[in-house]
C-alpha cells in the first residue's frame, strides 16, 4: 500500500483529473518554438478516415443516406480539433474541446426530442455515446502523447547542450595545458638567459589569457572572436619560433559564423604542432575563408610533411568533430594530404 503521505498527496492533487483531465505541464512559447516543431502525423488522418468508412459501411443503410456526409463532416471536425491540440497540447484546450462536444451533443439531443425524433434518438444513442467516448479518449491520449513527445525533445536538447558545454570545457582543458606548458617553458628560458624577447612574450601571453579564457565558457562564439583568439595564439608562437613560422591570414569581413570556441584554434595548433615545429626550417601556415552562397568554407593549411600513413583522429580532433556536429549537424571537417603539407577544410 502507498504511504499515508503519498495517499494524501494523491487525494489532494489528482482528484481533479476526474473532472478536469489532462496534462498539468504547460509549455512556454520558447519551449514550443524549441521543441514543438514536429509536423502533424498524416497517418492519423488516414487511420481515422479508414475506420470511419468501415463503421459507416456496417451501420448505414439505404434509409440513412444523410449519415455519410454528417459522419464525414464530424470526422473532419474531430481531426481539426486534434491538430489544434497538437499545436498546443494544454489541459485547458483539451477540456474546452471535450466539454464543448458534450454540450453540443446535449443541445442536439434536446432539439431532436422537441422535433419529435425521440425514437430515432433512442435508437442511435448508444452509437453516439460510443463515438463521443472514442473521440474524447482519442483527444486525451493524443494530448498526453504530445506532451510526452515535447518533454522528451526538451530533455534531448538539454542533454545535447550539456554535452556541448562539457565538450567545450574538455577542449579548453586539452588546448590550455599543452600550450601553457610550452609557452611558460620558453618564457622561463628567456628570463634565465636575459633574452629581450621575454617581455614582449609575457605581454602577448597575458593578453591572450585575459581575452581567451572567458571564451570557453560560451557554447558558441562569432568567427571574428575566434580569429582574434587565433591571432593572439599565433603572435605567441611566432615569438617562440621566430623566423621558422610565417603566417598568412585571409578571412574577409563577410565570413560570419557561430562556432564552438576553440574549433579553429585546435586546427591551427595541430598544424603547427605536426606540420611546422617538426621541421628544422619551420614552415608556412595559411588560414583562409570564403563564402559561397549559403556555405562558408574555412581552411587551415601548412607545408609540413603531411599526414602520416595510417593516421587517425586524435583526441583533440575527434572532440572537435563531435562539438562541431552538435552545434551544426550539416557541417563537415576534412583533412587532406596535399604533399607537401596538410589541408584542413571546415565547411558550414
Image (cartoon, helix red, strand yellow):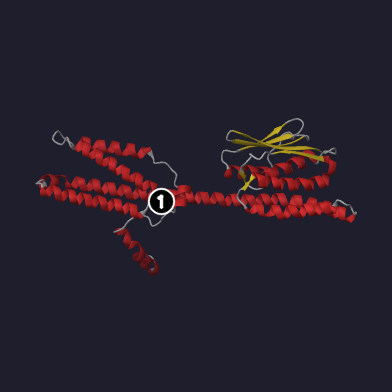
Q: Position of residue 289 (x, y in %)?
A: 67, 37
Left or right: residue 309 versus residue 80 is right
Which part of the image, by quadrant, shows the C terminus?
top right
| Quarter of the rendering containing residue 277 | top right
Q: Mark 1 — residue?
A: 147
Return the x and y of residue 165 as percentages of the image width and height. 60, 52
Look at 36% across and 64% down and name the residue there.
13
Q: Residue furthest front?
A: 253
In this view, which residue lies farthest toward the right?
A: 193
Image quadrant assignment for residue 326: top right
Q: Is residue 68 above or below residue 182?
A: above
Looking at the image, the residue that sits furthest to the bottom is 4
Task: Look at 59% across and 42% down and name the residue there.
Answer: 325
The front one of 296 and 94 is 296
Left/right placement of residue 318 relative to residue 41 reads: right
Residue found farthest to the left: 116
Amino acid at each position: 500500500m502507498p504511504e499515508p503521505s503519498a495517499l494524501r498527496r494523491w487525494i489532494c492533487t489528482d482528484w481533479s483529473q476526474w473532472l478536469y483531465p489532462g496534462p498539468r505541464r504547460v509549455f512556454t512559447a520558447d519551449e514550443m518554438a524549441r521543441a514543438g516543431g514536429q509536423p502533424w502525423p498524416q497517418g492519423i488522418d488516414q487511420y481515422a478516415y479508414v475506420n470511419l468508412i468501415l463503421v459507416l459501411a456496417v451501420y448505414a443503410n439505404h434509409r440513412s443516406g444523410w449519415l455519410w456526409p454528417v459522419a464525414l463532416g464530424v470526422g473532419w471536425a474531430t481531426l481539426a480539433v486534434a491538430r489544434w491540440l497538437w499545436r498546443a497540447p494544454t489541459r485547458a484546450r483539451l477540456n474546452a474541446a471535450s466539454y464543448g462536444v458534450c454540450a453540443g451533443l446535449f443541445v442536439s439531443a434536446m432539439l431532436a426530442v422537441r422535433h419529435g425524433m425521440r425514437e430515432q434518438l433512442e435508437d442511435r444513442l448508444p452509437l453516439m455515446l460510443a463515438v463521443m467516448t472514442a473521440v474524447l479518449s482519442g483527444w486525451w491520449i493524443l494530448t498526453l502523447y504530445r506532451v510526452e513527445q515535447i518533454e522528451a525533445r526538451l530533455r534531448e536538447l538539454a542533454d545535447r547542450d550539456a554535452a556541448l558545454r562539457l565538450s567545450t570545457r574538455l577542449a579548453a582543458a586539452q588546448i590550455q595545458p599543452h600550450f601553457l606548458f610550452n609557452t611558460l617553458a620558453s618564457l622561463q628560458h628567456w628570463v634565465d638567459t636575459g633574452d629581450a624577447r621575454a617581455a614582449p612574450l609575457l605581454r602577448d601571453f597575458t593578453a591572450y589569457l585575459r581575452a581567451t579564457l572567458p571564451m570557453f565558457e560560451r557554447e558558441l562564439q562569432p568567427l571574428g572572436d575566434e580569429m582574434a583568439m587565433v591571432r593572439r595564439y599565433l603572435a605567441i608562437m611566432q615569438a617562440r619560433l621566430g623566423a621558422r613560422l610565417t603566417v598568412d591570414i585571409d578571412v574577409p569581413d563577410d565570413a560570419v559564423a557561430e562556432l564552438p570556441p576553440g574549433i579553429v584554434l585546435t586546427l591551427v595548433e595541430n598544424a603547427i604542432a605536426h606540420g611546422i615545429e617538426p621541421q628544422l626550417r619551420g614552415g608556412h601556415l595559411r588560414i583562409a575563408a570564403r563564402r559561397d552562397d549559403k556555405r562558408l568554407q574555412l581552411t587551415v593549411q601548412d607545408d609540413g610533411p603531411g599526414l602520416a600513413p595510417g593516421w587517425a583522429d586524435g583526441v583533440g580532433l575527434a572532440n572537435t568533430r563531435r562539438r562541431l556536429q552538435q552545434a551544426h549537424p550539416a557541417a563537415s571537417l576534412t583533412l587532406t594530404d596535399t604533399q607537401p603539407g596538410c589541408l584542413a577544410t571546415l565547411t558550414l
